[in-house]
Every structure is written in C-alpha cells, then in structure tokens.
Amino acid sequence: MLPEARDAWLAAQEARWGDPERLHRPGRLAAQALDRSREVVAEAVGARPDEIVFPASGPHAVQAAIAGLAKGRARIGRTIVTTTIDHSAVLSAADATGSAVHTPVDHRGRLDLDAWAAAVRAEGVALACLQVANHEVGTLQPYREAAEICAAAGVPLVLDATAALGRVDLTRRVEWSALVGSAGAFGGPTSVGLLALRRSARWRAPYPTDDYQDGRWPGPPDVPAIFAAAVALEVWSADRETVGERQFAMIERLRLGIADRVSDVDTAGDPERRVPHLLTFSVLYVDGETLTLELDRAGFAVASGSACSANSETPSHVLAAMGALTHGNVRIGLTRTTTEAEVDALLEALPPIVAGLRARVRTS
Amino acid sequence: MTEPALVLDCLGWKCPRPIIELARRIAEVPVGETVKVIADDPAAGPDVAAWCRMRNQELTRSEPPEFWVRRLI
C-alpha cells in the first residue's frame, strides 16, 4: 500500500469507526468517511457519488458488473463481447455468465474496432466488456470509440479501468454502463474493489443483497479499507500527469535500453499509446522463472507471464493472443518512487544475467 | 504435402527447451525444407510462431502438439 493509504487505514482503526448504517457517533463518522470515499472515486471516473459501490475486490466488481447487467438483459440475449486479452477475471465472468465472443487485437495488443463493431451489432448481445488499458503490456485501448459503438447499438458496456485508474484521466464523459477497478492496482488495499454503476443502467443484483450500499453489494462495508483506497486514489490524482510523464520516459528508456543491450528480446505492447508504468518483454531461449529469480537476487522485484513461472501452468493468454513470445517473460511495473538510478541499475544488470542463462544452452 | 526433413520429438519438454531445440537443429535441414516439432508444452504453440517471426522462418502448419517450420534462411 502507499504510505498515505496505510496511514489513513491506521488512523481509521484508531478512530474506531462503527457500522455506517447506525445512528450512533461511530456509525456517523464511518458514514461520512464512506461518503467522502464515494466522492473521490466518483470524481476520478466521471460519475456521481451515489453511483459508486465498493465490492470486496476487483474480480468481485467485475463479476458483479457483468452478471448484473446480463441479468438485466436476459430477454435480449446471452452473448458477451470482450477481447482476447482482457483480464482473466473478465474472461471467466463472461464464460460463467453467458456466451463469450473474443474480439481480436493486433500484434501491439490494440483492439480491432471493425471486429468490435461487428460483434457488438450482432443479434442477442447482452453486454460488452473492454479494458481501458491492458494490465500486462500496458497498451491503451480505443475505449472511447468502442464505447460510442456500444452506445449506438444500445449495448451496455463494462469498462475495466483496473490498469488505468490513477494513471489515465478518466474524468471525461464516456458512455459506459459500469466501470470497474481494484484499489490494489493503485496502492490501496487489495480487499477493496470499485464498481461505478450508472443510475440509468439496467442492472439487477446477481446475488442476495441487503440494506448496505443501496442494495448493490451485501454486508457492512470495510470503511477503513475503503477510506484507505480513496486516499490512495487521491494521492495519484493529485500529481497524475507529473508522475505519469516521468514514468512514461523511464519505461521508454528501459524499452530502448533493453533492445540495445540484449539480443533476441521481444518487447510487447504499443510503445506510444500505453499507460506510463508498465513494460513487458520476453527473452528468447531463457526460462522465465529462472530469469525472474535471477533478477530478484540482483534486487529487482519483477513478475513473469511465462508458463513455467511460479504461479501459472499456462502461458499468458495476453501474450499468446498478441503473437508475442511467452517464454522468458519479465513484467515490470514502476512505482511512484522508482528512481532513474534504479532504471540504470536494471539496464546494467540484465545483459550479463541473460548472457549467463543463455550460456547454459547452446543455440545457433 | 512434403514429408519433413527432420522430426523433433519434444513431448514432455518444458518451455523454452522445445524452442531451443528447434533453434539448435534447424541448421541440419537444407533451406526450403521442413522441420516438424512435436511439443505438448502449452507455450509451444505461441512460441514456435513467435520464434519463426523473430528468426524469419516460416510456420507452415500449426496443429498442437505438432508444428511444421520451413527453413527460409
């Protein structure tokens, strides 16, 4: 968590807020904090505070949005249009809820708008779901145009803003019916999901609800965690452009520097139209898990989308759909405090690590 | 459909070993001839295709777990 978010969470615990539905003082304080949190999120996504709901996680928010809109559109059809590279939470929710159609992307991970339009305009489409930006390769989608296509066709759109919240300006009006996100993606607690539901959306709760959160997510909300999430989002919103510019340039330097110093590296994603902070590249002839461990030993905490990496048996569906190399994959996410010196250090450390791993195998 | 000049049985091999093997052995077939790779690792499909793109070789057929690569250079 961002230090500001952690401090806010601790302060909320000290303050001993109560159940926001109750009329006693601890309850009223909690209710005020919850209201304030909704205002912060509403402003960041161009919505009204009474449209903001906090489910228990990003994937919960995705499931709530998709299943709830599908329920409202059951008489029209079961088809759910998404892309080949949307987050696995979106793909699973689409498969579980209806019949998913996966619109293709180009080799940079950018949505084919013609294919999107054809899919959205077909018979029996319940809803569409599209990411603002890809969570692995960072490519920005033409989400504004995609949303206009959906609106013209009368198809509700779920916009997955997980990789974009706090990084991309989302305040301008876009025709979505639901917008989802995850506080963990911007330095808030991972136990807080974000769901913005337009008042006009035909959404029906796909699970039992109660009086909390206006009958859109059950159970007493974890107000300290929600408050911490809102603080994290405020921290990002305050200097989003400055930090964004700095990170964008660092990623560009990493991208070019790695291509310069290491042969046979496949860098995935759009180099220009992307979020500022992500970089994914795959190193030919090297095992992704070993590469990640070696980088970790050298002091760089990175992730991997390779099949042989610690938490996956299958390669990244994102890379595979884009035609990108999947083995030897490294995923870098810059933080607010990443320095130029750290970028230099990674550029220095990577070539000898790769050379060492490649020396273990002989290739032409 | 021509027979492959070389068959690489990489069943049970984990990524990136099937690709490393393909890269090592393709020089054994004349330019214009085909190598058939048999690899059941889930990364083999995407990675044989990506390797061909990066190495300017041609993936002529892909029916996992079998892949046909024609040597262009």
Image (cartoon, coloured by chain):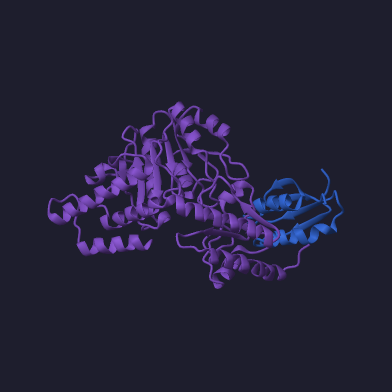
Q: Residue furthest bottom?
A: A297
Say left or right for A137 vs B39: left
Q: Nearer the viewer, residue A257 or A154?
A: A257
Residue A304, horizontal then vertical, whole percent = 56, 60
- Quarter of the image for residue A263 reads bottom right
Confirm whether residue B11 shows in the render: no
- Quarter of the image for residue A179 reads top left
**Rendered residue at 56%/34% (across/down):** A113
**Rendered residue at 33%/43% (across/down):** A42
In the image, residue A121 sits, relative to residue A264, either above or below, namely above
Confirm whether residue A351 shows in the render: yes
Residue A272, horizontal then vertical, whole percent = 58, 46
Residue A228, horizontal then vertical, whole percent = 31, 57
Q: Residue furthest front?
A: A242
Q: Residue furthest right?
A: B30
Q: Nearer the viewer, residue B65 or A45?
A: A45
Say which quadrant the N terminus of chain A sits in: bottom left
Count of numbered circles in the view: 0
Q: Nearer the viewer, residue A179 or A272?
A: A272
In the image, residue B41 sits, relative to residue A60, either above or below, namely below
Say left or right for A240 vs A364: left
- The picture's colour for chain B is blue
Say left or right for A212 vs A41: left
**Rendered residue at 36%/51% (across/down):** A193
- The picture's colour for chain A is purple
In the image, residue A196 sits, relative to residue B44, either above or below, namely above
Residue B8, horizontal then vertical, whole percent = 76, 58
Say which quadrant the C terminus of chain A sits in: bottom right
